[in-house]
Image: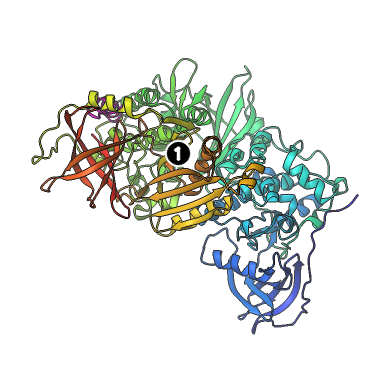
Amino acid sequence: MLPISVPSGPITQHLAGEEPIAGYRLIEPLGRGGFGEVWKCEAPGGLHKAIKFVSGKRSFDRQTSNAEQELRAMERIKAIRHPFLLSTERVEFVGDELVIVMELADRSLHDLLKECQARGEVGIPRWELVGYLREAAEVLDLLNQEYAIKHLDIKPRNIFLVGKHVKVADFGLAASLAELNDSEARQGGLTPLYAAPETFQGQVTLFSDQYSLAVTYVELLTGKPPFSARNLNQLMMQVCSQPPDLSGLPPEDRPVVGRALAKEPSQRYASCLEFMDELDAVSVPEFLPPRKANNTSYEFSLDELASTPGSLSNGSGIYRRRSRLVPTVRSSPPPAMSETLEGYTLLDSLGRGPAGELWRARNSKGDCCLLRFIALPSGSSERPAGLERIQNLRHEYLPRLQILPAGPERVALITPLGLGSLWERFRECHAAGMPGIPRNELLAALLRYATALDELYHEHELQHLLLSPRHLVHGPSSHWLLEFGMAECWWLPQNLQPAHLSPRYSAPELFESLVSDACDQYSLALIYQELLVGLHPFRNLNARQMANPRLRGAPDVSLLPGSDRSVVLQALSKEPDKRFRSCREFVLALQEAGRQGQKVVIATAPSAQGGLLCPTPPLPASEPNPSLPPAPSWKEPLEEILLHAGRGHEVRSVGLIHYRLAPAQHLEQRCLARLPTGMARLKLEGFREQWQAEEVHRGDRRTVYQIASKSNLWDRCLGRTPGLQVEIRIGTADNVTGLSPIRIRLDPVDCNRMRAEQLLGELGPTLLSSLQTYLHSQSEKSSQERFPLTQQLTLQFMGAKPILATLRDIGRDALCVLSPQPVACGPIQIQMNQWASAVTMTLSGRVVDCFAWDNHHELEIRLG
């Protein structure tokens, strides 16, 4: 049996007491690996640090040494700050070695695994491990998505414990793997056991680190990795072609981890955090080790597979928590509780926090229910009046509540378990490829809950104050509002603020310890957008950011249908007096806005996916332009134009990606993305590296790449290099939403018609999906795609001379015009001929962006 080894190369030996940098005295070695060695040192002031020496003598290629590669990686990340990123304090060359001074961690997760195994456990307890890796996932997503940096060497030895949190370290491979050739990449800094399949083929994707994180999870939980091999070649074959061994995982974990370990990168989760969220959401019974871990059963040595040292010293004890925001408990029930709840069997722990412990349980009849254990005030001998009031509330939307004693100064609140919540329905729709719950279905459900909330408020003068999609459930024959009254009758008298219990959906006044009569309406507005389009109006802000008005900022409603935006913004007003008078009035306003939107906008109504062509809101009907003549109805003539203009073009969809294809000619997509200054270049660089694209043009607003495909014998004989030219044009960001319009065009190059049609049909959608991943783009979700059409037309602006322009393409709700001069964004009227006739029609619209070309300007105009 041959162990897998990684050549370490020549390593410079150092001695204790040396000072490689003045003031930094070496104390003891901590480890060594393929790039160099790590020492514990005493820094000026008596502080202890870790110091890493990287040899510059062995090269990955003819031009780049280990030290140069490490230095390039450090240059890319040294300005990035994150609490879960191991900080680097000093980087410099000493002779032909690169010396890096780093924060000293307590120990690595690999060390923690060994400690757990020494105590007779198989691996790190699951509830503890998920908390650690969630923190690692957060920083990996930051580097991958915001800075286009891939770690490429995630493993237990590179995730360290500092106090009660983890920190990710060792970015020696943070430079793109595209700089390495295949054979050397397999033997260099990569650790083969944790490497994603695509890295063995010299490719790096946005999902490579997620794969490594999943392998790390399996090893740390079960004590052994998902692949066992006798040598390096066998391991590579298993990783690239065989399914992982997940038999040691709890059955509930296997489909989640299996997806993160998919051979095809695009089949994995969209982000590392989404992967950890899925693990966190799985209800897993206590994962007890069946026997003591036996390392001799491995078919290879884990120590020999690791190419970079990770042990930095002994430190703190086991970190007992699963989530940074909502701590949870072990799944085994405390004996006192199980003894006092006769007739109930505790099944799954659903979480623990300031609001007590929440469990799923089964009663003596076999029915499932929810149990919340809460502590009574010290010295309480009777049930408090607040709980009595909650139990006496009566309404068809309130489930039956039972309160039982659960030990000294504790009670259990028992409610029936509904058949499903709105959150579960949202996840079903999302899994089916939809962005959220269909609009009509969602509004019908919210209207029922809104009516119940208003009735309860007028009858009992109580609000929910803790509303979330998980509290809106449907029972066997009705709908329920879970935990209604708990906030005002129990938690507020206990000096526990609702905003601290549910910061994601709390109204801003609750963060200031104030309760208005429109708090639930604010929560409903947040819930409506999140369940409709899949994105929260404040994205994923944490509790501290939500509590701070400056950090919270303005809600982003750009993805909502245009008719909904003003309604939702009113319900999300910072001033409660400016919101609607009731929850029901808010939902009815949404329904009316949808009906009015169908009547006013001369385009088919937005789908349940929401969104319009551009985030800029349409001109209100009450603000006509007095200097322009009124525009007659143009719906029927426009439909005729579209009927003829669409010939020869196909509208296609792959998942949530929509694009227009002219077979064998070109492919186009329009989308939106939030791109802060300088971020577009970084994100596109990641795309270029993944596809090893040749950069043809690089500008502030326009970038062109050429991506070669595999050439066959006939291509080589003719001297052809077939491929696709990818053009990305980025427009001006909207002042309100911060979203920039993006136009992507793919053109075949150096190939015949048959090959061009094949490349656009097969490779084209894959490139669009990759660009969507790197740019974090969102489809424009307009009701219809646009079609190319060339025609002379006249642009008329208020108080300006008409401009003779040329139509480029047209759709039911937008068109593109080529103008000889730049045009400011604003209202406009367009005069153009109807199809194949001299009859003119006038269209009203709004210029939302202006792209500059060499000799003309391209205007994006939304109709209506």
- At label 1, which amino acid type do we have? Leu
Answer yes or no: is residue 517 visible: no
Residue lying at the far front of the rendered structure: 718
Kindly identify the residue that appears in the image at 71 percent across and 57 percent down.
185
Q: Quadrant of the C terminus?
A: top left
Q: How was this image coloured?
A: rainbow
Q: Circle 1 — which element?
A: strand
Residue situated in front as seen by the camera: 233 or 288:
233
Q: Can you say whether 503 is above or below 781 in the image?
A: below
Quarter of the image where one finds residue 514: top left
Residue 496 lies within the magenta run: no
Kindly identify the residue that appears in the image at 60 percent across and 49 percent down.
719
**Residue, disc 1:** 667
Please provide percent x and percent y for residue 80: 52, 63
* Majority secondary structure in the magenta region: helix
Please provide percent x and percent y for residue 397: 41, 22
Asked whether, in this view, residue 156 is left or right of residue 830, the answer is: right
Asked whether, in this view, residue 606 is left or right of residue 274, the answer is: left
Asked whether, in this view, residue 166 is left or right of residue 845, the answer is: right
